[in-house]
Amino acid sequence: QVQLVESGGGSVQAGGSLRLSCAASEYNFRSSCMGWFRQAPGMEREGVASIRALSTVTYYPDSVKGRFTISRDNAKNTLYLQMNSLKPEDTAIYYCAATRGACSYPLSKVEYIYWGQGTQVTVSS
């Protein structure tokens, strides 16, 4: 059974940094699109970073571009999200997600079938 386990969330002041990790078990990690999503209270879950299967091509929405960096270590079956210059509006629960195989819309949550339990990120002003 595929399991995705996030870690690295926490509280930080505006302008600070956090690095999230997502460990994937029993999974064809390298052949799937992987993504980070976030959901703030009362808001839709949105994609903040994704990386294509068998590739290093990455995608970001304008809201985080230049501040967030997604990366993957296929040897360790681990996905990362480096978040710099954090803002209070980045406060949310962050989820790691994976597709089954390639994806057409890497930042769309409908593409992803495996999800982690989420980790809280809180940015104070």
Image: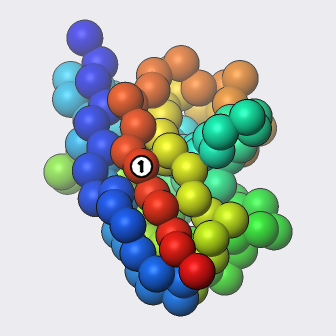
Outermost residue toward the top in this view? 1
Front position in the image: 51 or 6 = 6
Outermost residue toward the front in this view? 125
| SS for dot 1 | strand
| Residue 24 located left or right of residue 108 | left
Q: Position of residue 40 (x, y in %)?
A: 64, 44
Task: For label 1, count other residues whose C-alpha is less than 10 Å away and answer few (under 14), some (14-19) or many (20+).
Answer: some
For label 1, the residue is 120
Front position in the image: 49 or 15 = 15
Q: In this view, does 86 lie above or below 81?
A: below
Quadrant position of the C terminus in the picture:
bottom right
Examine the rendering and report whether any part of residue 108 can be seen.
no
Q: Where is residue 2 in the image (x, y as percent from the top left)?
A: 29, 19
Q: Is residue 87 above or below residue 99?
A: below
| Residue 109 located left or right of residue 56 | right
Front position in the image: 63 or 23 = 63
Q: Quadrant of residue 87?
A: bottom right
- Residue in the picture at 50% in, 44% down: 93
Query: Which amino acid, by three-letter code, is at mark 1?
Result: Gln
Q: Is residue 97 above or below residue 18?
A: above
User: For the image shown, how many numbered marks are present on the structure?
Assistant: 1
Q: Where is residue 69 in the image (x, y as percent from the top left)?
A: 52, 71
Examine the rendering and report whether any part of residue 114 can be seen.
yes
- Residue in the picture at 20% in, 52% down: 75
Q: In this view, does 47 lie above or below 66?
A: above
